[in-house]
Structures are given as structure tokens and as C-alpha cells.
Image (cartoon, rainbow, N blue to C red):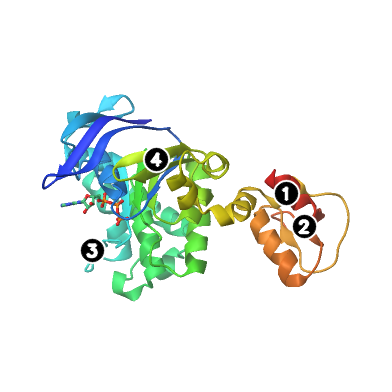
């Protein structure tokens, strides 16, 4: 668990963070969202002491982070940023191995870890481990950035717009990978974004910031159904609220027995994707399969409404 207590931060006389109090649960993916300049990155960077608060304290697993040197703290906390920051003259393997090297892991353990992470992020190790960053696409570089942040198996992973500047398909793939990694590892992840759909998709705990303060925090449903202010209502997108609520439900939750023709939808897809299929195919019933491609029933258009209730 990460606890931020009465933290203030000013830059050149301008207060960027105002008496921030925030608890980020252990083992959950928390998202910091807000408009540009609202203090998201500053908050994130205070967690690994890239920025020091002017006052207040930050506790990691109950211990004040100032009791550790910034270096040892950063070895415990993975950090992935939009601009990736890979070392250009190091191979993919060397980049991923940076923190394990500092921690003096044995060579064979480091090699195994690189293989494991490249496989996890769907970069075949034989093909990619010896490449240099300029020999990778932007999306592949971002994957290596995420692999590097995960390398020493940190308890906490901080991610600042890690999927920014990616095309929607690669972004979607990496978001799904992050959900998978989070489910497998149960890590505490704090992710900064200004994309509300990314926040709703990934955030088990969502913190919406406005001018260095918390406008509202909670689960996706809380922000969508019970916005605390006009700012929150506006930010989460009043007119698209219904669509976004659909995005929180899964096809599998609404499946009925039956059969239908046509290309099936997987049970783990969300109901927003299902709605899109109903509209584009002009049908009212879709066949549903599980993750192994086995038929598991049908989804009726009318059942979408129940999910949104
Ligand atoms: N090193 C700095 N020097 C001066 N001002 C800064 C510095 N870092 C941040 N600020 C200011 O603090 C405020 C919060 O910045 P921060 O980067 O935390 O916002 P953000 O919510 O992450 O924004 P964005 O979405 O644009 O990245 C802004 O007004 C910014 O100009």
C-alpha cells in the first residue's frame, strides 16, 4: 500500500500539489487521470523520489520513503515512461538487464529473466534480445520499456503514459497485456494517463485530479454513475456515459443458452465491443465462444440493457 499524507509541492512559487492525501491499495492497478498540468506526473515522481515534496510524507508498505536512498528505492520500484528512455547503445537484453545487473544477479538468472519478460510481452527472445532500440518500432520500444521496469520483479510499478503515442491497435494490445500481467503478478501499479477510456479499462482504483487536488476517486462505476461535481461529470464524458458503462461489462456475464450464426464474439470481450458488432452487422443476437474457441451460447441485444443497469 502507498500512502500519501498531506503532501504539498510548489514550483517557482506556483503550487502544483495541494495538501494531497491519497491511499493506493496494494496489489491493485490505480490510475491517476486529469487534464494537463493537474499534477499527475508530479505525484507519480514523488513516489520514487524523482521529485521531493515540500512537506508531508509518503509511506510505502508502512515505511517513509525518505528512509531509503533514492537509488535503493528505485531498484524496488519499476518506472516506465512514455518516452521510453532506453539506452540507445545497449541491446534490448542489456536494457532490460539494467536493474538486475545493479543488484548483481548471477548472469544465468539475468538471461532467464530477459527470456521470460520478452516472452511475456510477446517479443520472441531469439529475434529481439540482441537488437538495438533503433531497430524496433515505437510499440516494441515501449514493450521493452515495460519489460525493463518489470525486470527486477519490483513490488511497485509506476507508469507515466506508457502507451502514449501508440496507434490504437498496439495500445489496445499493450493494455490487454498489462491487465494480464497485473492479474498474474498482483503487483501494485500506478499508471498516469489523460485518456479516460484507458483509465476506465485499466483502473481498479481511479483518482481524478484537478489543479493539484483530488476531484474524485473510486471505481469506474463510481465516477460514471455518481460524479462528485460538474468537473467530474464533464471529464468522464456525460454524453458517452452509457457507452462507457457498457465497456465495464463482459459478454460472458450476459450469455444465454442458444445458437446463432455468424462470426462469434469471445466471452471476455466487453459489452461496448458487442454493441459495435450488433450495429455493424445489423443483428440482434451474436454467438459467443470462450477463450478456447468453444461455443458457450449467445448474446442478445436486449441483454445489453441489463448490463448497463
Ligand atoms: N520541474 C518543473 N518546474 C516547474 N514547474 C513544473 C515542473 N514540473 C511540473 N511543473 C508544473 O506543475 C504542474 C503539474 O505538472 P505535472 O507534470 O505534474 O502535470 P500532469 O498532470 O502530469 O500534466 P500532463 O498531463 O501535461 O503531463 C504544472 O503546472 C507544471 O507546469
Is label 1 or label 3 in front? 1
Can you tell which mark lies on residue 252? 1
Can you tell which mark lies on residue 288? 2
Query: Please, what secondary structure does the residue beneath circle 2 have?
Result: strand
Q: Is mark 3 within 8 Å of ligand 1?
A: no
First of labels 3, 2 by sequence position = 3
First of labels 4, 2 by sequence position = 4
Q: CA distance from mark 1 to mark 3?
A: 43 Å
- Residue 96 on image: x %, y %: 32, 56
Query: Dot 4, crowdedness within 10 Å: few (<14), some or many (≥20)?
Result: some
Query: Dot 3, crowdedness within 10 Å: few (<14), some or many (≥20)?
Result: some
Residue at position x 43%, y 59% in the image: 118
Query: Please, what secondary structure does the residue beneath circle 1 have?
Result: helix
- Residue 194 on image: x %, y %: 40, 55
Q: CA distance from mark 4 to mark 3?
A: 37 Å
Q: CA distance from mark 1 to mark 2?
A: 8 Å
Residue at position x 73%, y 67% in the image: 279
Residue 108 in sight in this render: no
* Front-lying residue, 233 or 132: 233
From the viewer's perspective, tell me whether residue 22 is left or right of residue 227. left
Is label 4 or label 2 in front? 4
Q: Which residue is mark 4?
A: 215
Q: Which residue is mark 3?
A: 87
- Residue 45 on image: x %, y %: 25, 45
Query: Please, what secondary structure does the residue beneath circle 3 have?
Result: loop
Amino acid at each position: 500500500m502507498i500512502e500519501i499524507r498531506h503532501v504539498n509541492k510548489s514550483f517557482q512559487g506556483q503550487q502544483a500539489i495541494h495538501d494531497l492525501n491519497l491511499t493506493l491499495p496494494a496489489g491493485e492497478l490505480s490510475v491517476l487521470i486529469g487534464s494537463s498540468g493537474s499534477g499527475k506526473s508530479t505525484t507519480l515522481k514523488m513516489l520514487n523520489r524523482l521529485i521531493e515534496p515540500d512537506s508531508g510524507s509518503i509511506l510505502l508498505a508502512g515505511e517513509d520513503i525518505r528512509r531509503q536512498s533514492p537509488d535503493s528505492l528505485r531498484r524496488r520500484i519499476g518506472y516506465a515512461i512514455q518516452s521510453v528512455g532506453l539506452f540507445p547503445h545497449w541491446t534490448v537484453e542489456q536494457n532490460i538487464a539494467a536493474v538486475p545487473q545493479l543488484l548483481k544477479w548471477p548472469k544465468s538468472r539475468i538471461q532467464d529473466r530477459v527470456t521470460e519478460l520478452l516472452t511475456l510481452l510477446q517479443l520472441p527472445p531469439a529475434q529481439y534480445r540482441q537488437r538495438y532500440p533503433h531497430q524496433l518500432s515505437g510499440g516494441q520500444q515501449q514493450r521493452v520499456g515495460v519489460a525493463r521496469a518489470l525486470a527486477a520483479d519490483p513490488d511497485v510499478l509506476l507508469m507515466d503514459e506508457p502507451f502514449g503515442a501508440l496507434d490504437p491497435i498496439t495500445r489496445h494490445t499493450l493494455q490487454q497485456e498489462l491487465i494480464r500481467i497485473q492479474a498474474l503478478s498482483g503487483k501494485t501499479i500506478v499508471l498516469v494517463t489523460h485518456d479516460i477510456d484507458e483509465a476506465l479499462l485499466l483502473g481498479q482504483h481511479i483518482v481524478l485530479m484537478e489543479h493539484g487536488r483530488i476531484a474524485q476517486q473510486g471505481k469506474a462505476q463510481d465516477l460514471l454513475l455518481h460524479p462528485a461535481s460538474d468537473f467530474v461529470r464533464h471529464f468522464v464524458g456525460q454524453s458517452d456515459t452509457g457507452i462507457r458503462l457498457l465497456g465495464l461489462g463482459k459478454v460472458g456475464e450476459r450469455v444465454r443458452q442458444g445458437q446463432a450464426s455468424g462470426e462469434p464474439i469471445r466471452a471476455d470481450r466487453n459489452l461496448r465491443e458487442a454493441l459495435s458488432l450488433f450495429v455493424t452487422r445489423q443483428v440482434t443476437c451474436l454467438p459467443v465462444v470462450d477463450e478456447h474457441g468453444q461455443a458457450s451460447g449467445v448474446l442478445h441485444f436486449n441483454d445489453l440493457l441489463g448490463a448497463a443497469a
